[in-house]
Amino acid sequence: MTINFLCPIHRDWVYFHPQEALTYIEEAQQQGEILLEKQDWQEATAFLGCAFETTTILMELQGVGRSYMLSRLTSLAILLANSFNKLSANYNSTAILEQAKRLLHLATDDSLDNKPKFAYIKECLFAISASQGKSNQRVPLDQIAASKQMH
């Protein structure tokens, strides 16, 4: 399952302006992280989701094996999954992590002859798997209620 965060107009913008989209990813991720610190999970999810989708589009355009995109994909997937978990949207969290794993596996297939890159991709996959293990832990109901009251 693929979750869309960008509207069709912005999705087209990414395809036609890939260089500017790189700057957008950085800005959206930073804003998402600020919102995570403020525990504004809904807004953080929107910013992180747009950055994540933009990253997947750029990987499609530039090839899945670009190492700087692999690290960006990994960090955004983990941040976005955590944000979804805070919203009790565990299904979406799992979907994002699985989508990132699929893209990383594609990059692995393209990197079999490049041992350092292959090892790096394996580290990204491990980070996502570790994140999935943490997301399977249950959050006590009183903590969820307390965080909702703060907004």
Image: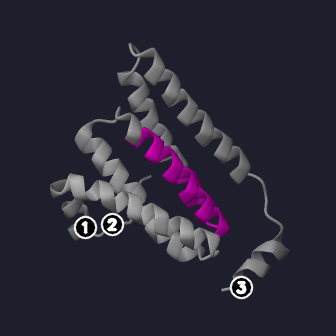
* Above-or-below relation of 38 to 135: below
Closer-to-camera residue (85/43): 43
Q: Is residue 87 visible?
A: no
Identify the residue position indicated by label 1 in the image: 10
Pointer 2 local density, CA inside 10 Å: few below 14, some 14–19, many at least 20: some
Q: Where's the C terminus, which quadrant?
A: bottom right
Q: Percent x, y for residue 40?
A: 59, 77
Residue 30 is a magenta residue: no
Q: CA distance from mark 2 to mark 1?
A: 6 Å
Residue tagged 2: 6
Callout 3: 10 Å neighbours few (<14), some, many (20+)?
few
Mark 1 vs mark 3, CA separation in Å:
32 Å
Say if 123 sits above or below 33 in the image.
above
Disc assigned to residue 150:
3
What segment carries the magenta color?
69-96
Q: Residue at (34%, 35%) from the top-left corner? A: 66
Taking the view exactly as shown, the residue that stands out farthest to the left is 16
Labels 2 and 1 touching (C-beta < 8 A): yes
Left or right of residue 33: residue 106: left
Please provide percent x and percent y for residue 24: 33, 62
**Left or right, residue 88 beside residue 73:** right
Q: Nearer the viewer, mark 2 or mark 3?
A: 3
x, y percentage for residue 97? Answer: 54, 48
Indicate the secondary structure of the residue bearing disc 3: loop
At x 41% / y 65%, what residue is drawn? 28
Q: What element does badge 2 sit on?
A: loop
